[in-house]
Amino acid sequence: MKKQYLIIIVFLLFLTSFNGFSQNNSVLINDTSDIENLSIYPNPVSQGKVYINTVNNSQKKIEIYNVLGKVILTVSISQNELNISKLKAGIYIIKITENNITATRKLIVK
């Protein structure tokens, strides 16, 4: 019986002193690297065109990834309209780069 208590106490001390796998909220996320006033609509997309607006509306490099991380589409656009009619229905990640600032969003195609 004393041996069991000793094992339990040692185990509890080990758990309380071991902090390697706990989540830590001390990392601050800096959102200043996001593209200013980025809007992507409609989302979900059903008509094959998505509109990407920003404050600058300058040249944008667009990369679309599937959920496995494979690049599906890479284009550069100077206007705000992107034709995605060749994409199958599903969930994608869209990465937008404008003036060396990058933002990623989820894109749903119906």
Image: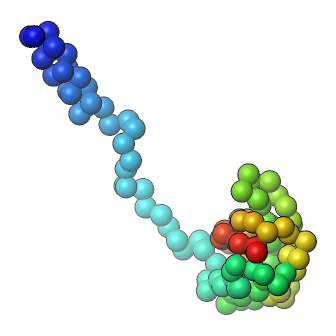
Say which residue appears at 64% left-offset and 78% top-offset: 35
14 to the left or right of 104: left
Give the image location of residue 19, x and y in percent: 32, 37
* Vertical order, 107 against 81 (above or below): above
Give the image location of residue 31, x and y in percent: 52, 71
Q: Quadrant of residue 8?
A: top left
Q: Is residue 80 visible?
A: yes
User: For this rendering, which residue is in front, 46 or 42?
Assistant: 46
As drawn, the residue found furthest toward the right would be: 86
Identify the image quadrant of the C terminus: bottom right
Say which residue appears at 9% left-offset and 10% top-offset: 2
* Vertical order, 43 against 102 (above or below): below
Say which residue appears at 70% left-offset and 85% top-offset: 41
71 to the left or right of 105: right
Q: Is residue 99 visible?
A: no
User: For this rendering, which residue is in front, 82 or 59?
Assistant: 82
Give the image location of residue 80, x and y in percent: 80, 88
